[in-house]
Amino acid sequence: MNQEHILIVDDEPDIRNLISEILTDEGYSVTTAANGQEANQQLSRKQPNLILLDIWMPDIDGISLMKEWNEKNLVTAPIVMMSGHGTVETAVEATRLGAKDFIEKPLSLAKLLQTVSETLANSEQAIDNKDKQNNTIIEPIGSSEAITQVRATLDKVFKSRNHVMIEGEHGTGKYSTAQLIHHKRHAHDQPCVLMDAQTLDGDFKEILTHSNGYFSRSGSGSLIINNVDSLNDEQQKILLSSLKHKQFTVFRQNTVQPISFQIIAISQLNINQQIAKNAFSPELYDLLAEVKVTVPSLQQRQQDIPELITYFVNTLPDTEQTPYRKMSFAAQNRLRNQQWKNNIQGLKNTVRQLQLMGGEGEISLEEVNTLMEQAEETNQKRSNNWTDLPLREAREAFEKEYLIHQLKAVDGRVGELAKVAGMERTHLYRKLRALNINPKDVMKP
């Protein structure tokens, strides 16, 4: 899991070392500083996620140091003050300046760990909520029968507190749908935490159940599990056990917490097909898919394409500062009849490119045809014999051809591919993304 980085600023070596050892054992990344000068040096090297700051130090007191940081905008992390000679006035002043909490010495281990965990969790939730407020939650666009059915299903899902499984082709808007479900259920009142199963590395049980892990951070909100089909057998068993019992034991603590959040799982593959191949637990699927939402491809909702084009034409200039250019009906019709391998994402990318590549005025049919021809030429070049390419491109072409061949041989199971290729799973996922290989697309007939 990504380690939260904590900076300890205290002039007493024994205190610094003790806190550092405790927090390191709890899985945090820790650096220390003996005074204000060393603290500033540490901040110049790496911004922490949390600062534990002693008030009384020889070169500068913690209150003055915090004022300096505020004036120069040097720190964005939450600050927890520590003092063996604390007074009410000092605590009030520290809070007024932005300190999130105040710990008295001698330190209580339980109090220290609780304060660190809660401060980090609250800070991350505040960032998540700020990001959500800056993001536009997109309702399903279109009037086709396919998207109308999805909209009707979602209206019922919004009112429920069930776990949800979202399936569909790459680029259809599954993650946007997951965000919409959370927003309609909780707005900004509860956290929405994302876990990508393709990028997990380390002890999965710790990743889930650590005091600042995915389960604790999800609170009573939503845990979105992207690429849930990438969970290996052991990971599936760990997740299944927690969901069956509707609770989890906090990692390295004798504390049991109920599961009060809802999981919104996103799959790039057809899970029923994965179950038939013994690649996914049917019991886990039944728990995750209390409600199932299948997002249709653009091929299934072609009549919505003009409406989607209009949406992107009008919103991209505001969100991405692209030039505003309307699109002719002939150009829209050309795009309406295009085969969109990457669905809505591909359509959005094309509209963006058309806004950027041309001059002023309306986007014409000729511009669309030119862009489509260029894309086709690029695809043709990619399919040429890799032995005619420069070394770097040839290596990438060989790797892509090799990995696609092996993926087909193992029925699209990335875990099996990692064994065949002799690669660490996380590194393999990075390689697949770098080469633009989607296991789901590889297995299409």
Image (cartoon, grey):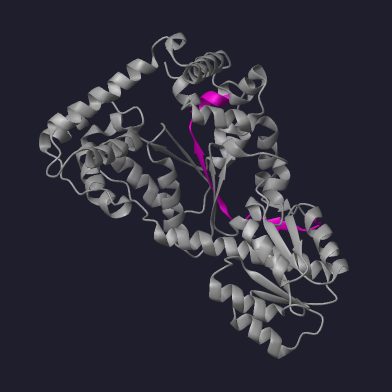
| 258 relative to 309, above or below | below
Residue depicted at x 63% and y 51%: 214
Residue 277: quadrant of the picture: top right
Coordinates of residue 272 in the picture (x, y in percent) = 52, 27
Residue depicted at x 73% and y 47%: 206
Coordinates of residue 431 in the picture (x, y in percent) = 55, 28
Residue 380: quadrant of the picture: top left
Foreground residue, 428 or 109? 428
Residue depicted at x 33% and y 33%: 343
> Is residue 295 shown in magenta?
no
Numbered range of the magenta stretch: 253-275
Foreground residue, 208 or 100? 100
Relative placement, left or right, of 36 versus 349 is right
Relative placement, left or right, of 375 versus 196 is left
| 346 relative to 38, above or below | above
Q: Quadrant of the C terminus?
A: top left
Residue 339: quadrant of the picture: top left
